[in-house]
Amino acid sequence: MNGSIEAFLEDLATAKGAGRNTLDAYRRDLTGLAVWLSLRNIVEWDSVAPGDIATWIQYRREAGDAVSSLARRFATVRSFYRYLLREGALAKDPTAPLPQPRRDRPLPRALGEADTKRLLEQTNGDDPNSLRDRAVLETLYGGGLRASELCGLKLRDVTLSEGRARVLGKGDKERMVQLGAEAQDAIVAWMTRGRPSLLTEVSQDFLFVSDRGKPLTRQTLASIVKRLARATGVDDGTSPHTLRHSFATHMVERGADIRAVQEMLGHASIDTTQIYTAVDAKRLTAVHRKHHPRA
């Protein structure tokens, strides 16, 4: 079994130019599998059944491997067996009927409420750009909008008397978003004291415009958010989507119904929104570990 592993690694090195670290990782995974199989009296690669691979994956899971590690190990074994098939060393690939272990879905990165407040209050000037930036941040955070949704907002989409806006989301699906009092006030200030001085003919229908009088783009929006986050001392990786995540996270932390949050975000599936319950559970776990005397 070890001879087949070394032949596979040599093929990776010569045919695909795999580096030392990659080869070492592949060797560890395959050697570990070979040892595990030998303890179960399986000493030939063509004697391995799909159930053996599945049991090994479960063994590694119970040993504490993260899903990302399991996915890597499985990919290594699958590549190895495909090599053996190409070489004619066996007739069947035991990994073929098995699903790839799903990788951990990263939790969305959101700002804490204190950092969000600091970021929003960073834009307190009375010049057109500051008024726009404040309205932009308040609208992103107040309504949980995507960057493209905010940039596409037109005057006819906003009903300030009701504190709502109509946005065009993914798949050209329309939905109504709530703006909140702070966002409404910021939009009024922008429209009355900032927007007229930046407006041009090409942007007259759009709610938000750039310094040059053009409709706001996602790139410009991202630059605005990043600049303000740096000035505030908030996480340098803050983006427009961070404010959308913060909107959802804070709503769930304060007890909002997950179905309502799904509608506000415009998620087609509740599964997408459920990630924010994991964020809240993670926060509660951290609080428990920090404050409970027996944690």
Image (cartoon, helix red, strand yellow):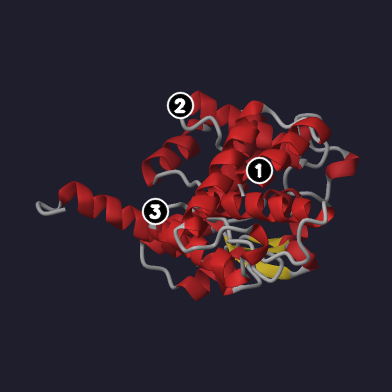
Name the residue: 68% across, 56% down: 78
Residues under labels 3 and 2: Cα distance?
37 Å
Mark 2: secondary structure: loop
User: What numbered label is drawn on residue 3?
Assistant: 1
Q: For the residue carrying disc 3, how many other residues have a C-alpha within 10 Å: few (<14), some (14-19), or many (20+)?
A: few
Q: Amino acid at mark 1?
A: Gly
Q: Is residue 291 visible?
A: yes
Name the residue: 73% across, 34% down: 10
Residue extending farthest to the right is: 201
Name the residue: 53% across, 33% down: 123
Residue extending farthest to the top is: 231
Query: Quick one: label 1 or label 2, which is nearer the N terminus?
Result: 1
Q: Amino acid at mark 2?
A: Gly
Number of disc labels? 3
Residue 137 image-quadrant placement: top right
195 or 165, nearer to the observer:
165
User: What numbered label is drawn on residue 64?
Assistant: 3
Query: Quick one: label 3 or label 2, which is nearer the N terminus?
Result: 3
Left or right, 82 with respect to 104, comes to: right
Determine which residue is flagged by label 2.
233
Mark 1: secondary structure: helix
Q: Position of residue 256 (x, y in %)?
A: 42, 68
Q: Amino acid at mark 3?
A: Gly
